[in-house]
Amino acid sequence: MPINYYIFLAITLFCIGIVGVLTRRNAIIIFMCIELMLNAVNILLVAFSKMHYLAAATANPATNVGSEAQLFVFFIMVVAAAEVTVGLAIIVMMYRNIHSVDINFLNRLKH
Amino acid sequence: MNVIILSAILGVIMMYTGVMSKNKSTARYVATAGILALIGANWLEFAGVNFFNIDTRGMLEFTSFGLVFNLIILVCTLVYFLLSGKDLEEVGANAADYFALIFFILTGIAIVSAFKTMLMLFIGIEIISIPLYILAGSDKKNLRSNEAALKYFLMGSFSTGLMLMGIALLYGATGTFYTDGMYLGLGNITVMKMAGLVLLMISLGFKVSAVPFHFWTPDVYDGSPTVFTSFMATIVKAAFFIAFLLLFENAFGRMHSEWQFAMALITAATLIIGNITAVFQQSVKRMLAYSSIAQAGFMLLAIFALNNIGKQGLILYTAAYSLPTIGIFAVLMRMKDYTYEGFNGFAKHQPLLAALLAVFLFSLAGIPLTGGFFAKYYMLVAAMKNGAMFWLVIIGVCCAAISVYYYFRIIQAMYFREGADPGIQVSEGFKTVLVLTAVLVIILGVHPDWLLHLLDN
């Protein structure tokens, strides 16, 4: 499959994530949209990794070009997991205090 | 490398200290000793002594610029621990954990001051950010602290997502994560590279709270417990700036003319909006949040100019902005009333503290004989040397003049208004440290060269 398809898929998922973050009011859903953005990046990185590998493999079949992007994906997963831990803890902490996860509540801080 | 590994170990040690020791202040003593050890280790690395020899495959490179920056950060953290360590214990039940998180943040700062690949940039920024989300929300029962943590978390991880997309696009276009290996020169600019650059600029703009990505800053700084605001607004902000500068110098330096205008617009907007909004604030804490945006505008001049004077200026600015702000916050968090009226008659009841606060405010406003003057001077000279866009320098000078107004409002309240005794208790040790900090700020303003000479090694 040409690389363009992967790029379009990743960009579409990423844009869905951004629109979700900007328009939704529920903290959990915003959080899911952020995860969607990170995973769109993962797809893109793996696709690019394969692309660079195929470009280099014609000259040298034993090349390891492109492997660093797949390693990067693991780092993103680990960091995303760490973010989930902290983020859900914060959302739970907020829920305990106000019994809601609606971020309209945040506007109170303006004053 | 010394600082990265030792501070991570110290973070773990702090966590164990919290478990082992019932006494609250033990954690503070261990943390202060730990910071002193880190300063020593950083100094030894400067002299060429490495405790650890790890092959990072060129992912990290320890330059004298990064090491001097680390030194300033560590000294600022030491001052912060000495001045605010007691208040830090009172935020919650787990004082040792807060110290541990701060040590982890220092690990991240050491990484972003030395990164050579996008992977290390990402890891470093996340190691700084994730503990900060926790610190912002550490006052668990306080709604404002909850709000600050949630807002910071959502904005922070959103900007991380943008940064990752930028990195992925740059990787696709160049086939490498190494900032030096990208060869993003003129003549080979594609849509993908440009999109990557813009996304990275936006996400780092979020992190350093540059206008128009600054809207979370006042709320988060205002809502977080004041001890942690002090840390976030000074040390962490400077660390994000070093990441910003190194990234744009190493990866995008050759296409400087492509993004210079966008950076000039961001800088001008940050200077103008930061300063003008700060004028209208009633609470000193919120004013300091906006002042941190305004000062970020000056630091952005270094990235706009991208020359040697700008780099020196950023080093100087880190010291000349962080030390006074930490000092002001240390006094502010002992006040009951955070408005300007709270400072009325402060000079009569606390003459020494008032004089020291005045020195700090002079430095922030950039009055000569304090560090802030030379910091601003270097930034403006850097922008001027750059040659293009002289109007930015004029905006910078005008904004420095505006900033005098809101900093001097505190001085006016302290010296020329009558007011009740704020009733703050400070120990002799606190006063001594504050005096030493003020002396350091004045030395920076009289003779900034001793700091900049370190860069030549």
Image (cartoon, helix red, strand yellow):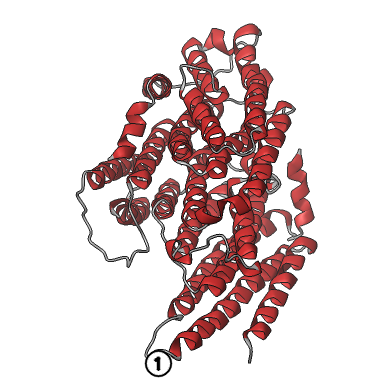
Left or right, B68 with reference to B354: left
Q: Give residue A60's quadrant in the image.
A: bottom left
Number of dots carrying numbers: 1
Residue found at x 34% / y 52%: B7
Q: Is residue B127 above or below residue A34?
A: above
Amino acid carrying label 1: it is: Pro
Pick the quarter of the image with the C terminus of chain B. top left
**Residue B344 seen in the figure:** no
- Residue A58 lies, in percent from the top left, at 45, 91
Give the structural element (helix, strand or loop) at label 1.
loop
- Residue B381 lies, in percent from the top left, at 52, 30
Residue found at x 43% / y 50%: B109
Left or right, B425 with reference to A3: left
**Residue B38 seen in the figure:** yes
Pick the quarter of the image with the N terminus of chain B. bottom left
- Residue B163 lies, in percent from the top left, at 59, 62
- Residue A21 lies, in percent from the top left, at 73, 64
Q: Please, which chain is the residue tagged with disc 1 on? A: A
Q: Is residue B358 above or below residue A20?
A: above
Residue labelled with disc 1: A61
Residue toward you, B422 or B435: B435
Residue found at x 69% / y 81%: A9
Residue toward you, A22 or B185: B185
Q: Is residue A20 above or below residue B307?
A: below
Q: Is residue A8 above or below residue B189?
A: below
Q: Dot 1, how many residues are within 10 Å of its Cα: few (below 14), some (14-19), or many (20+)?
A: few
Residue toward you, A108 or A13: A13
Residue toward you, B335 or A96: B335
